[in-house]
Amino acid sequence: MSTTTRNTNSILFDLIALTKPRVNFLIIFTAIVGMLLAQDYNLDYQLMFYASIGIYLAASAAAVINHIVDQKIDAIMDRTKSRPLIKGNVTTNHAIYFSLFISALSIYILFEYVNTITTMLTLFSIIVYSIIYSVYLKNLTSQNIVIGGIAGAMPPLLGWTAVTNGVSELPLLLFLIIFLWTPPHFWALAVYKQEDYSKANVPMLPVTHGADFTRLHIFLYSILLFCITLFPYLLNLVSYIYLISALILGGKFIYDSYDLYLTKNKRKAFELFKYSISYLALLFAALLADHYILML
């Protein structure tokens, strides 16, 4: 393999790394669940393909912009100082061009092949995450992740609107579930990496209000999240299959959050952070199983 080929492959790999592909996997999964919940067995595969690509590219663009904005912070924090922009593997200009290109491509695909409402909601999500959150809120308030979580909660709603060209109770509840899941998810990581955030002067909740205050709010949010996850069943939008899953998964989330609150063990904060990812994926998988088993 020539040096030019290796360099090209390395740049492509670094550009992909800027899009946070592991994070985007969960994003696109919840979006696809939203699409599937809006349909029966007669799936519109072409529409789902275009919608998935458009939503994935939008999330990727927002992630790249976040990398660009966070360079000074990332250079200080141990968790992020090996990112491509910090190591100089990708220039800031190249990252900007890349983010603009995939943003424009996302909006074009959604507008041309999906529908207007999904296009506008996706554009709104990009603006909230990459500008309102990344540029302003992240360094302004300890509630940064709460408000910024609006963008992260959009995917199932986008998936639903892509198929139906409208909004109803279930996708709004899914939006609310992810919105309430986001703070305890990120605050658990912030407790584990408190020194890192403090060193970079990022006003995450443990930095501004202390770890004890944050652990308490993680626990309180886990209870609120548990309650909201029951609403799809209470409103007769799902069946007992989802209900049982929500009770088990949510019960563990509350138990682990309370355990973290009592023990004040940083390792348990990281374990809760990891479980929260599995929790959301399994909860949405349960929604999908519930949806299709009911149609048998």
Image: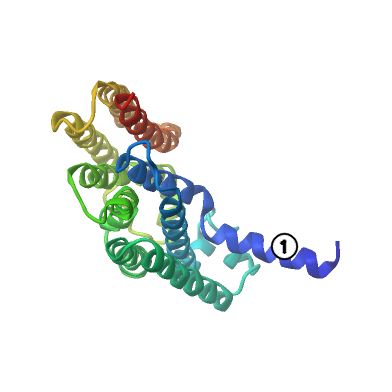
Residue 78 in view in this figure: yes
Relative to 289, residue 146 above or below: below
Left or right relative to 30: residue 81: right
> x, y (%) of residue 188?
37, 41
Residue 187 in view in this figure: no
> x, y (%) of residue 208?
29, 54
Residue 249 found in image quarter? top left
Please state which of residues 44 and 214 is positioned toward the viewer in this rendering.
Answer: 44
Which residue is most to the left? Answer: 235
At mark 1, the secondary structure is helix
Please state which of residues 140 and 133 is positioned toward the viewer in this rendering.
Answer: 133
> x, y (%) of residue 218?
28, 38
Relative to 42, residue 208 above or below: below
Please state which of residues 215 and 172 is positioned toward the viewer in this rendering.
Answer: 172
**Residue annotated with mark 1:** 9
Give the amino acid at mark 1.
Asn
Which residue is most to the bottom? Answer: 93
Determine crowd level at label 1: few under 14, some 14-19, many 20+ residues with C-alpha closer than 10 A: few
